[in-house]
């Protein structure tokens, strides 16, 4: 399985499905960003759906919630993340095999068809990736449904009116985004062409009653048609560095590699779901020491607060979760942690090195991570990854 990036370590490590609907036991592929098109900040001008409403793009500024304020009353230093953990990521003073049995994972059967991604999943992800590399088409006529970049200025009785001008507006030809048949009239025209678009404002016209029922002319320049490239080896080679960065994979060489990455992402995601279900429904501890429940609660509160500005108690107080659900979450996380440690004890994973940190943090500086989260927390994360792989690698996959 491909490793998570550090960006989602804190958000997911101790967050389980019972409370936050996210996977706390399995692993999520770092290419998940790619699968959701590696959301990039758009540099395109956003315009009103009505050319007479005002069209200048306004940048909304917001403070970065992460790091702008420290969580009041919720400690979050390395000594807190690693609270109750030894440097090798074990619960201090706890032998996990005294509290949980390691199941025969091979007795759990999964149909391979339940793991294989659909063609639709893969093709949709590829389309989203390709859309991050738009091409400007200037050598054909605008067709119905094209995504087109235009400039326009509105005139009434030969006089240009306010709030009817835009530069670099992105519109869909033939749609009803603008008044009357404005965007239908650009169909059949060529990029680089300037034309008059004649419209009549509706009556009544709430946005500007003075315009109701009046005729107007918009001088429109078609700049280009947005195009989406095809996934070819040539395209991959042309954009290789950016693609590798987006998909977190320096081994990419061609189009087939990209298909492989998306296939593996969805396969791993489906396996995560199977693992979650298995851990929730079939894995039970004989006993969970209170100290482990306390550690799970402490670290989960830190993670929830840092990522959502709320503790588990806040979720309870505001009705987002019941006390039963919250307690179940602590039990599920504690049970998973006990099983992972039991596997580590059995397999002899007792000395976590800096190289081991790198295997699950995409090469992040180990000392920097330890300074933020403490050695115990990062070591526990390594163990969790190894144990999750160990479990799914022992499942029986049926053709």
Image (tube, rainbow, N blue to C red):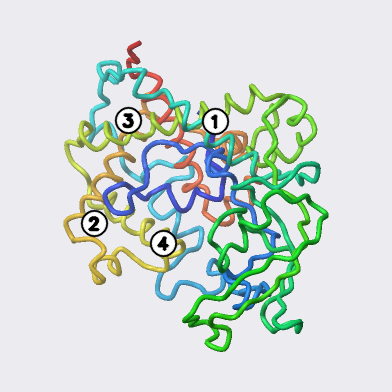
Left or right: 287 in relation to 371: left
Residue under pointer 2: 326
Q: For residue 353, which quarter of the picture?
A: top right
Q: How many marks?
A: 4
Residue to which mark 3 is pinned: 274
Residue situated furthest right in the rendering: 192
- Tell us which disc is closer to us: 2 or 1: 1
x, y percent for residue 80 = 44, 60
Please identify, in this view, whether the residue under mark 3 or under mark 1 is nearer the observer: 1
Cα distance in 3D space between marks 2 and 3: 22 Å
Pointer 4 residue: 302
Give the CA separation, mark 3 to mark 1.
Answer: 18 Å
Q: Which residue is mark 1?
A: 262
Return the x and y of residue 277 as percentages of the image width and height.
27, 34
Of residues 326 and 373, the one nearer the viewer is 326
Which residue corresponds to the image point at 72% horizontal and 78% vertical from the top-left?
155
Q: Secondary structure at mark 2?
A: helix
Seen from the viewer's position, the closer of residues 225 and 320 is 225
Discs 2, 3 touching: Cβ within 8 Å? no
């Amino acid at each position: 399985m491909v490793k998570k990036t550090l960006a989602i370590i804190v958000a997911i490590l101790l967050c389980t499905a019972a409370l936050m609907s996210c996977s706390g036991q399995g692993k999520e592929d770092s290419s998940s960003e790619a699968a959701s098109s590696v959301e990039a900040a758009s540099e395109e001008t956003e315009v009103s759906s009505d050319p007479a409403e005002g069209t200048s793009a306004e940048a909304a500024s917001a403070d970065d919630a992460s790091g702008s304020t420290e969580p009041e009353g919720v400690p979050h230093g390395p000594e807190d993340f690693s609270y109750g953990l030894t440097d090798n990521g074990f619960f201090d003073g706890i032998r996990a095999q005294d509290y949980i049995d390691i199941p025969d994972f091979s007795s759990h059967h999964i149909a391979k068809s339940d793991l294989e991604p659909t063609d639709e999943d893969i093709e949709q992800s590829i389309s989203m990736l390709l859309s991050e590399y738009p091409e400007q088409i200037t050598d054909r006529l605008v067709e119905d449904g094209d995504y087109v970049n235009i400039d326009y200025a509105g005139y009434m009785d030969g006089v240009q009116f306010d709030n009817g001008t835009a530069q670099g507006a992105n519109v869909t030809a033939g749609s009803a985004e603008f008044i009357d048949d404005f965007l239908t009239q650009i169909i059949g025209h060529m990029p680089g062409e300037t034309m008059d678009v004649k419209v009549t404002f509706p009556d009544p016209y709430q946005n500007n009653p003075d315009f109701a029922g009046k005729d107007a002319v918009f001088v429109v320049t078609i700049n280009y048609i947005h195009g989406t490239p095809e996934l070819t080896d040539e395209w991959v080679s042309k954009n290789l560095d950016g693609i590798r960065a987006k998909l977190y994979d320096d081994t990419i060489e061609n189009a087939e590699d990209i298909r492989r990455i998306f296939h593996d992402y969805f396969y791993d995601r489906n396996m995560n779901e199977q693992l979650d279900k298995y851990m929730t429904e079939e894995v039970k501890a004989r006993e969970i020491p209170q100290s482990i429940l306390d550690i799970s609660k402490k670290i989960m509160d830190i993670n929830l607060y840092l990522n959502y500005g709320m503790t588990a108690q806040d979720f309870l107080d505001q009705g987002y979760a019941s006390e039963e659900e919250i307690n179940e979450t602590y039990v599920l996380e504690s049970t998973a942690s006990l099983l992972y440690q039991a596997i580590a004890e059995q397999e002899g994973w007792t000395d976590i090195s800096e190289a081991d940190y790198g295997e699950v943090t995409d090469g992040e500086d180990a000392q920097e991570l330890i300074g933020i989260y403490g050695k115990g927390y990062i070591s526990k994360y390594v163990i969790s990854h190894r144990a999750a792989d160990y479990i799914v690698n022992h499942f029986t996959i049926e053709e």
